[in-house]
Image (spheres, grey):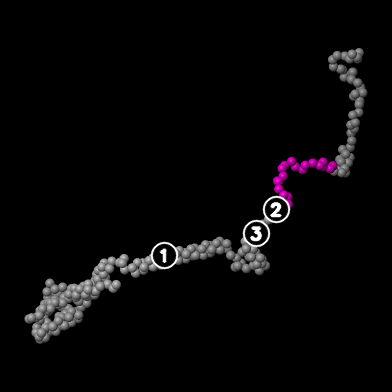
Amino acid sequence: MSDDFVAGFASRHQINPATIGRNDGFAPADLAARAQLAGSAPPATKAAGPKSFSPRPVGPKHFSPAPAAPEPEQAEEAASWDGRSADPHAFVDPIERARAAAFEEGVAHARALAEAERERDLALLHGLAAQLGNGGRIDRDALAEQLRATVLTLVRQMLGEVSIAPEQLARRAEAATALIADAAESAVLRLHPEDVPLVKSHLPATLHPVADASVARGHYVLEAAATLIEDGPSHWLGQLETAIERVALPQ
């Protein structure tokens, strides 16, 4: 051990004066001159290295999606459109165009339905005509009875209107007097009470009307010395029914 070593802290008076007075290379300088010198110095080049550590999208750098091809109608309109001579009335509202297209589609659908219904009705008519042409499937007796009933109903209505006409009733009674053997013979004409005032002025002098409630309207009973004649719609209908029943349906 050196003789100069002393245990404990060294006194500041024992520190080597050379250490305190040593120059470490620092010297005061003019700050303005240093700033001017720094501004005239060329900028330092940035060291080469990655610009960013964020991941980049993967894909070809030269690729970009092509614009969608316009519709033929839109392409034609775009080609023929001139902005310098644009007509405001030539603009077509797309909503109106869609509404018109929907209307045309609805009309076409309605026509198709009507045509289908017409074809169905024609098929039904053809089938009905084919069945009617086959006489074996028709109840001829029932059809004949219905036809007779229809004819009699119509005739009964017509006779009911004609039989109570005063001129017609008087003419029938006068025609009945011609059947009497002696035309000058007086006769009694029995009529319904409501028919007597209607025909009284139209009868010849040899006929004497008498009211009889048992005689139906439009009927009469002619009574002479040796003759009795009855006539009226009920007698006509009976004769008509007999005639119709004798007529057969055509084959």
- Give the amino acid at mark 3: Ala
- Give the amino acid at mark 1: Arg
State the predominant SS element of the stretch in magenta.
Answer: loop
- Give the amino acid at mark 2: Ser
C-alpha span from label 1 to label 3 = 47 Å
Looking at the picture, does residue 193 appear above or below residue 52? below
Work out whether mark 2 precedes mark 1 in sequence or the reverse, and give the earlier one. 2
Q: Residue at x 71, y 43 (%)?
A: 55
Q: Residue at x 26, y 67 (%)?
A: 142
Q: Which residue is mark 3?
A: 69
Q: Which residue is mark 2?
A: 64
Q: Which structural element holds mark 2? A: loop
x and y, in percent, of residue 195 in the image? 16, 76
> For residue 183, which quarter of the picture?
bottom left
Q: Which residue is mark 1?
A: 120
**Quarter the N terminus occupies:** top right
Residue 203 visible: no
Instruction: Magenta stretch: give its range.
Output: 44-63
Work out whether mark 3 precedes mark 2 in sequence or the reverse, and give the earlier one. 2
For disc 1, the neighbor class at 10 Å (few under 14, some 14 to 19, many from 20) is: few
Q: Could you say which disc has been placed on residue 71 in the image?
A: none
Left or right: 218, with 142 as reference point: left
Q: Residue furthest left?
A: 225
Q: Residue at x 55, y 62 (%)?
A: 98
Q: Residue at x 36, y 68 (%)?
A: 130
> For residue 126, which quarter of the picture?
bottom left
**Quarter the C terminus occupies:** bottom left
Left or right: 241, with 183 as reference point: right
For disc 2, the neighbor class at 10 Å (few under 14, some 14 to 19, many from 20) is: few
Q: Which structural element holds mark 1? A: helix
Q: Nearer the viewer, mark 2 or mark 1?
A: 1
